[in-house]
Structure formats: C-alpha cells, structure tokens
Image (spheres, rainbow, N blue to C red):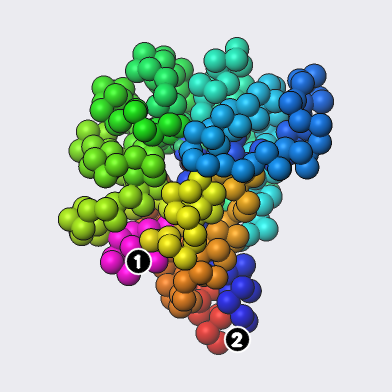
Amino acid sequence: MNQTQFIQQLPKVELHLHIEGSLEPEMMFSLAQRNNIQLPFATPEEVKTAYEFTNLQSFLDIYYQGANVLVNEQDFYDLTWAYMLHCQQDNVIHTEIFFDPQTHTARGIEFATVVNGIDRALQDAEQQLGITSRLIMCFLRHLDEESAFTTLAQALPYKDKIIGIGLDSSELGHPPEKFLRVFAKAREEGFLTVAHAGEEGPVSNIYDSLELLNVSRVDHGVRCSDDAVLVSELAEISMPLTVCPLSNTKLKVFEKMEQHNIVELLRQGVKVTINSDDPAYFGGYMTDNFLAVANSHALTEAELAQFTQNAIEASFISQQEKQVLSAKLAAFMQQKATS
Ligand code: HPA
Ligand code: ZN
C-alpha cells in the first residue's frame, strides 16, 4: 500500500466543517433553479473561476451569497446528504458539523427548517452509511450580541439535536470578548463551546477564547506559533486545534503548504487535527486535506494516524463511543501491518 492509498483508506474524523461550505457549484445551480433564484453566474464552471480568494473576507462574501439558494427543508437535507456521501468516500467515520442559522433566519427562513433538514440527513447517514455525527451551531461574529442571544433562544428547543455552540465569520475586529455573555448563557444551558480563533486574528483571540469563552477546542488556532509560551500551554492542557490546511492556503493564512505549521505543532505535542472547513470552496474534502499535508511534509503512517486519534479524543462523543472509534483505527493499523 503506498502512502496515497494509506491516506485514502485511513479512518478519519472531521471536527471542522461548515455545512454551507459543502455547497458544490452544481448543487448551487440545481437549487437556484428549484427555488427560482437568480445567480450572478451563468454556469457552475463560472462559479468555480470566481473562487480566487485573497483573505477570509473575500471568501465570506461569496460564501454567504451562495447560501441564498438554500430555502426549504429538503434543500438543507440534500446539502447535508451530499456531504455525508463524501464522508463515506473518504472513510470519515464520525463528523461534527457547523451550521450558521443567522445566514438563513436573516432571509426569513425558519430556524426549524434549517435544523430539521440537516438533522434528518444526519440520522439517515447514521442508519444507512454507519457514519456518526454531532451538530454545532455557530454565531456570526460580525453580527451583534443581541442577534446571538436571539439565536441561542431559538436553539433551546433543539438541545437534543445541537451539542455545542461555535463562533465564526470575520475574526478581525470581532474579538471573543464581544460574545462573553452569550457564551456564558450557552454553557449554563448545557452546550459545549468552541470558537474560531487565531486564523487571521492575533494570539490574544486564542487566549481569550480559552479564558473568556471556556472553549473545549480552538478552531484553526494556527497563529499560536507566534507565541512559544502559548504553544507549550496548548500542548500541556491537551487543547485540540481543528486545523484546515487547504482553507489556510486558499485564504493566504500560509502562502504555501510547505510553510504550514501543522506538522511542527504535531511534533511539539499539540493536539492538532486535519479538517476541510468549506470543501466546496477550498478544493477538497478530508482525503484531499490529508494528501495536501503529506505531499508537502514528510510524515510517517503513525503520524498520519495520530491526526485521527487526536480527533477522536477531541470529539464531543461519549468515552464509550470514543473507544469504538479508537478500536476501528487500531484495527486498520493492525491489518495494514500484517497485509
Ligand atoms: N473562518 C471563519 N468563518 C468561516 C470560515 C472560516 O474559515 N468558514 C466558514 N465560515
Ligand atoms: Zn471554519
């Protein structure tokens, strides 16, 4: 088995995936047609050529525009189901998915329409594909605290379907502190918390996510390398980072994959994981992200498997469920060693 085959077959766990970011141009067109929505592009190919980003904001502008084609519960179902089929193809055995309700409720779409469509596809995927999942609701940080509180209130009847609360969108100018009170309320209500921090923003956003928002994981977090003390502390407390290699190079967080710090962080003992973020926009799903890292850094099979083990440990499932996933990974490594 060569390394490409090893990566393709390796059991994987995804912890950083925006479901709206899995909207492929072809589906964008078919949903636009189904819902009678005018797109500013003539063909799916034209959409793809528009995906040249210079920073996070240049991506977000296009990403929010694309999400306008999602209207009915079936649209959210179809979007999520298509992503779960990619998981099956990439041997993703568990996935924790972000969704951005404010992107939809601001257009008059009911909160229930969004959650029920996504959840129904996740249930079907567990039954038909054997892939487990959890759902995490993100607040858009460019919107105000009041809108986040309104969104949290909308989520309360869906506690059985939503395990955690996250924070995404434009990091610069919207520090964690802005959401201190709504995150405190979310934790009081029993939600786990995560936050995007240290993607484009400074290390202070990583410190503040840990101290003010009490996050269980940091999304991205790659700017931690600006502060050696922080890197040691992240390793010391086993704080997971959900790193997204293709996203980081597409949004110019790193100019080239060779310059990406994920392998250095792994070897410094930080609990880093590999994730796809917005695969329809950044050029690949989980296997592609693993391949991009492995093709630019010399990695052993044990190190590649460590990314999955880290993600299992960092996931929001029970200890018992973690043991089941760890056993699947161990069985794969064992079988590969004897084949
Ligand atoms: N960063 C911030 N917000 C986002 C991202 C991201 O990488 N993807 C989707 N929303
Ligand atoms: Zn993200």
Q: Which numbered disc covers residue 264?
A: 1
In reply to whether residue 73 is colored magenta, the answer given is no
Where residue 96 appears, x then y in whole percent?
A: 49, 45
Which label is found at residue 89?
A: none
Label 1: few (<14), some (14–19) or many (≥20) C-alpha neighbours in 10 Å? few
Residue at mark 1 to residue at mark 2: CA–CA distance: 31 Å
User: Which of disc 2 and disc 1 is earlier in sequence?
Assistant: 1
Q: Are marks 1 and 2 in contact (CB under 8 Å)?
A: no
Q: Residue 243, percent across and down?
A: 43, 53
Identify the image quadrant of the N terminus: bottom right
* Residue at figure coordinates x 33%, y 59% from the top left: 271
Under mark 1, the amino acid is Glu
**Amino acid under label 2?**
Ser
Q: Quadrant of residue 178?
A: top left
For image coordinates 72% across by 37% down, the residue present is 47
203 vs 94, left or right, is left
Q: Nearer the viewer, residue 245 or 235?
A: 245
Q: Is residue 128 above or below residue 74?
A: below
Regarding mark 2 in the picture, which secondary structure is present there? loop
Q: How crowded is the residue under tag 2: few (<14 C-alpha within 10 Å), some, or many (20+)?
A: few
Bounds of the magenta span?
263-273
* Left or right relative to 293: residue 315: left
Q: Nearer the viewer, residue 79 or 176?
A: 176
Horizontal side, residue 213 vs residue 53: left or right: left
Report whether 52 appears left or right of 221.
right
Magenta-span inclusion, residue 268: yes
Q: Which residue is mark 2?
A: 339
Residue at image position (44%, 26%) is 140
Q: Which is in the foreground here, disc 1 or disc 2?
A: 1
Residue drawn at (65%, 23%) of the image: 68
Camera-side residue of 92 and 69 = 69
